[in-house]
Amino acid sequence: MALFSPDNFKITIPFQINDFPTVLQTHIDDEEKEEKLDKVQKKLSEWQDVMYAHNRYGVLICLQGMDTSGKDSLIREVFKEFNPRGVVVHSFKTPNSTELEHDYLWRHYLVLPEKGKFAVFNRTHYENVLVTRVHPEYILNENLPGIEKVEDITPEFWENRFEQINNFEKHIVQNGTIVLKFYFHMSKEEQRKRLLRRLEEEEHHWKFSPGDLKERDRWDDYMKYYEEAINKTSKPHAPWYVIPSDDKDMARYMVAKIIWEEMQKYTDIKEPELDAKVKADFALYREKLSK
């Protein structure tokens, strides 16, 4: 496997989630990983400045994974060199009463990235075909026509949702949003270690929730539905990348590197040329300012 080719982690054919590695074997030590990430961070920050000046594209980064898979720390590390006005992070929790009065994609439309900016969805619109698959009773809160009880939620219902999500992403891509989706693939054993650390180290106590253990009990269900969702919604215009995430440092570098390499495909993103007449009058402007 060529280590940092995005295509090696992009889902283009049906994949089996349990056959995909959760750790990438390399000879890169932790210090070198940090150095490599630092370099990519700076390049992405400079690229965002150019993209802002170009003002034709926004970038949507979607992050999904089980609890403790490293999404929060990745956001902090990968985007810390960005101009704060150039990237906005949105963490989607349980829908509130206002959000439930609209369709499930409504709240995501509201916070799509402006042209020239990055938006990061920490947990995403895919919660609506992941958490709700494991807990279909949540669908009842949406007050949907014809859905009165869990038994009313048919396989066709979920197929329609996948189609709606694909159409949503196709629509925003056609209107200038670059979409990159990352699933943080972590082993159940690694999650156990990370949850234990939250219990054993005082500075991490605040991160622990008993609900994490309840969701962990449904691990196999989540893996099943992640596999299905990724296979049904990884498209050329909005691809999924499966990132081995037992090693957080490597996962951060991989995501940053993939974003950088994918951005290089947009060769039309350049700093705009200054109007020729304005450039021709530079000497006049200098003279006015020097006085």
Image: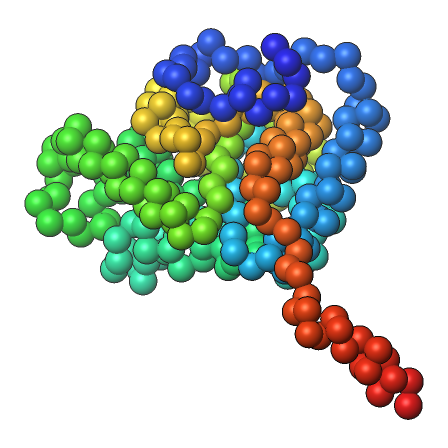
Residue 221 in view of the camera: no
The residue lying toward the viewer, choosing from 37 and 277, is 277
Residue 138: image quadrant is: top left
* 139 and 277: which is toward the camera: 277
| In this picture, residue 73 sits left or right of residue 231 | right
- Percent from the top left, x then y, of residue 164? 26, 41
Q: Judge by depth and name the residue closer to the eye, 16 or 136.
A: 16
* Coordinates of residue 270 in the picture (x, y in percent): 64, 51
Q: From the viewer's perspective, is 76 left or right of 174? A: right
Query: Can residue 150 be seen?
Result: yes
Q: Position of residue 283 (x, y in %)?
A: 84, 78
Q: Quadrant where the N terminus lies?
A: top right
**Depicted 214 relative to depicted 275: above or below:** above
* Rendered image quadrant of residue 129: top left
Residue at x 23%, y 49% (from the top left corner)? 141
Q: Is residue 86 left or right of residue 30?
A: left
Q: Is residue 188 above or below residue 112?
A: above
User: Quadrant where the C terminus lies?
Assistant: bottom right
Report the residue at 49% width, 44% height from top. Answer: 178
Instruction: Determine the residue positioned at 8% across, 45% down.
Output: 146
Tell which residue pokes out farthest to the left in this image. Answer: 146
